[in-house]
Amino acid sequence: MPAFKLFAEPKERVRWLTDDEVTRLLEACPPKWRGMIRVSLATGLRQSNVTAMRWEWVDLDRSTLCVPGEFFKNGKDFAIPLSDDAVAAIRESLGDHPTFVFADDNGKPFGKIRSKAWKDTLARAEIENLRWHDLRHTWASRMTQAGVPTQALQRLGGWETAAMVNKYAHHNVETLRQFVDAKGQPEPTSHLRHTGVQRRLRLVG
């Protein structure tokens, strides 16, 4: 086999929204976007699954969502429970369109969010370096920081492997603080000396 050079693995992108940034984004975005952004932050769904969301996928009485497999690369149906905030955001769109959950000001379903409209929204919100897909990163990181098990997060996010979860879900410094004093830390030297003296005294006695 001839020798060839491997390209370096691209640097992992780590970007999620702070609570303050979420507030500013919701205030600055077009009103018709707010429900979609809230659902994205509450479910981690990709943009295409949110903009194409149909009423037939949603069961508001049971607070569940089932997206047919034809809308996913793996071809598998995707069903998840919906949080209270996701249900509330979806309910606010009742009556906007007979088929699609979210519709624009002209009553038409959203396609791909235009780049210029997104950049203008970020400028008004004074937010930098953010893609719509980072809303999925934000959801996953918040879930991880809240202590949601990786296996459950993998199922909720629709990832095939736990390795994919780790690309999206990140801890921050404060959520890691609870682990720094966990058991298994070396005992202080003074304590060890004291314990050794006690052991020798017992042997002598």
Image (cartoon, rainbow, N blue to C red):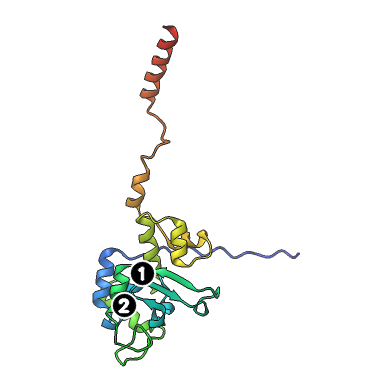
Residue at the front extreme, as displayed? 61
Determine whether 199 is above or below 158 in the image: above
Q: How many tags in the picture?
A: 2
Q: Which residue is mark 2?
A: 90
Q: Does the image show residue 184?
A: yes
User: Cβ–Cβ below 8 Å for labels 1 and 2?
Assistant: yes
Q: Pick out the residue farthest to the bottom.
A: 106
Residue name at image x 38 percent, y 40 percent: 182
Looking at the image, tell me whether mark 1 or mark 2 is earlier in sequence order: 1
**Residue 11, percent from left and from top:** 49, 63
What x and y, as percent, mark residue 158?
Answer: 48, 67
Q: Residue furthest top?
A: 205
Task: Tell me the amino acid under the disc marked 2.
Answer: Ile
Residue at the image position 62 percent from the left and 64 percent from the top: 6
Vertical order, 29 against 174 (above or below): below
Residue 46, disc = none
Q: Where does label 1 land, which residue?
A: 82
